[in-house]
Image: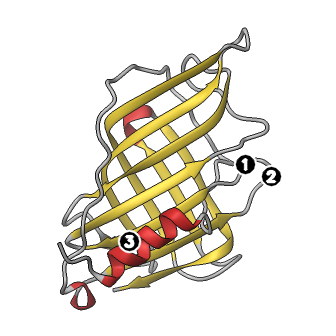
Amino acid sequence: MQVSSISRAALTVFFSGALACSADRIQSPSGSALSPGPASFGAVGQNSRATASVVGGGIVDGPLGLTSQLGIGATSTGGSFQCVMAGRSGGFPFGPWSQVLQMDVYGDVTPGSLTINPDGSATFSGKAHVQVVGRDATGKILRAAFSDIDYNTTHWAGGPGVATHQLNVVGLGLVFGPTPLKSGRITIVP
């Protein structure tokens, strides 16, 4: 299998730990349990230079302990997305967790879902695998994995202080951001 340059860039971002997202604005629902499933990442087509795209990521600004890592490689033909919120000192409540310590959201970009909006931002959606680790009200560590969770995300291009990221984990009722990047870069090609 041959991997396009956008896929390579997205995979490099995912595994380098150089990129991030934040949860400074969070809405949480009552949690529901779903079965875990395998992770999958979509390959971006070889003709990606001829289509719209959003690529990059970065550490999103926010209070100490509330930043995460983000990787994006999306075109109109598909792609991959990952946001890792790890090492949270304060956490946030969600379902049976009184304090979420780690959350990983990763999945494919649904082909045809990438939209370049009139304000220049890019929005796409897909299905994600979500892993959560945290504490319940008694302090007991709880772990769960959710599969095929609907998500959508909106990005604004630029570097630190300019680029912005918002993640809506629709299937779990969580909203993170919008928040500017502290470091990294997001590039949008219409």
Q: Is residue 122 visible?
A: no
As drawn, the label of residue 66 is 1
Q: Which of the two discs, 3 and 1, labels the residue nearer the N terminus?
A: 1
Q: Which of the two discs, 2 and 3, labels the residue nearer the N terminus?
A: 2
Proximity of marks 2 and 3: CB atoms separated by less than 8 Å: no
> Mark 2: few, some, or many residues within 10 Å (few <14, many ≥20)?
few
Give the residue drawn at x 22%, y 91%: 50
Give, as a three-letter code, the residue at label 2.
Answer: Pro
As drawn, the label of residue 104 is none
How many marks can you see?
3
Between residues 25 and 79, which one lies in front from this camera angle?
79
Percent x, y for residue 140?
67, 13
Proximity of marks 1 and 2: CB atoms separated by less than 8 Å: yes
> Mark 3: few, some, or many residues within 10 Å (few <14, many ≥20)?
many
**How much space separates mark 3 and mark 1, taking CA atoms?**
23 Å
Quadrant of the image occupied by residue 178: bottom right
Q: Is residue 58 left or right of residue 56?
A: right
In the rendered image, the vertical position of residue 180 relative to residue 148, given as above or below = below
Proximity of marks 3 and 1: CB atoms separated by less than 8 Å: no
Give, as a three-letter code, the residue at label 3.
Answer: Gly
